Image: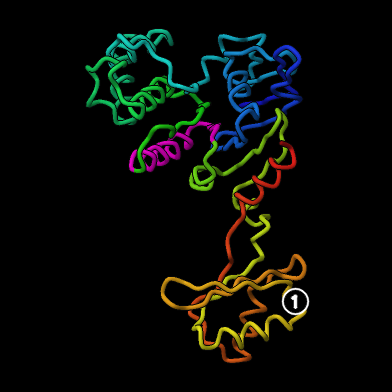
Amino acid sequence: MLELHDIGKKFGRFTAVESFDLALMPGDILGLLGPNGAGKTTLMRMASGFLRPDEGRVVVGGWDLAKSRRKALGMIGYLPEGSPAYGEMEVSDFLDFCARARNITGRAKDIACARAMERTQIDDVANQPVQLLSKGYKRRLGLAQAILAEPPLLLLDEPTDGLDPNQRSRMRVLIRELAEHAAVLISTHLLDEVEAICNRTVIMAKGQKLLDSTPAALKRAGRAHHHIRMELDAAQAERVANILLMDQAVGGLRAEATDDGHVALLLTPEEEQDLLGYVGMLAHQYGWDLHQIGRAGGGLADVFKDLTRSNS
């Protein structure tokens, strides 16, 4: 549905995006992650046709954006950064204007506007001027105009920016619903957003793609994926820790008190190996009474920090 072929963009001597490739298929919800200044918004603007790349090609639904611009743009719904809108217009009038700009007229226009307002839950402010809306409502209005024509490609730049936790949760549900009939590209700086709704993740920094994978795979690749956290009574913590420290499979151990008076032991493997099953076997062998045992976490946050730190 979306193909980016070696696209690049410079502003003077500054390279914002360099030789970027990407392919997005229907059903994909791809989270584009990167630190500030990574080039995410520039990439989204080029993919949407708002900004012309200096090199490379953008193809939407088989149509080259440079050669068949009208056909390609007709397949895109774009939520830009900042949700720009005409402040003096009422919400319903703004959506009516956007629908007519997409050649949606008559009864179909009325149905499309009403459906978009209902899906984004802004129908209660239909008669309010845009300039009086809160940031969250403006963001949802921006999404409403993007989905008016039910396009097969959605480009959403920070779609949950300004939303409260309940609104963010509903937005995630809506994006999943939209992805049943569209390809969705989301630019975000929120790692939990990617883990919650995306089935693909691209990490970029300094205008370059560093990694293209799935959130689950990235979570497994994190430095802390093989780290183990076990919780037990303080009375047996020292004995258990001494046994583990003498084991060649354990590279490091750290103890910390928990809020309920227990002790948590955090284990690091000597090498990149899975300690969970092995420590479970030791617990059974020595008769340790564990309150809980599991992986220590890390994952996507670790991968993001490692990749972007080395490219900062």
User: 260 or 18, which is in the foreground?
Assistant: 260
User: 186 or 76, which is in the foreground?
Assistant: 186
Residue 150 placement: quadrant: top left
At x 65% / y 20%, what residue is drawn? 59
Count of marks, rendered view: 1
Q: Quadrant of the N terminus?
A: top right
Q: Is residue 260 left or right of residue 246?
A: left
At x 71% / y 36%, what residue is drawn? 312
Q: Position of residue 31 (x, y in %)?
A: 57, 37
Q: Position of residue 73 (x, y in %)?
A: 55, 14
At x 70% / y 71%, what residue is drawn? 252
Q: Position of residue 200 (x, y in %)?
A: 60, 42
Is 172 part of what is drawn in magenta? yes
User: 98 or 36, which is in the foreground?
Assistant: 36
At x 24% / y 23%, what residue is drawn? 125
Residue 209 placement: quadrant: top right
Where does the magenta region start and end? 166-188
The amino acid pointed to by label 1 is Ala
Residue 65 placement: quadrant: top right
Q: Is residue 293 left or right of residue 116?
A: right
Q: Is residue 85 left or right of residue 17?
A: left
Q: Which residue is mark 1?
A: 249
- Kindly state the secondary structure of the residue where label 1 is placed: loop
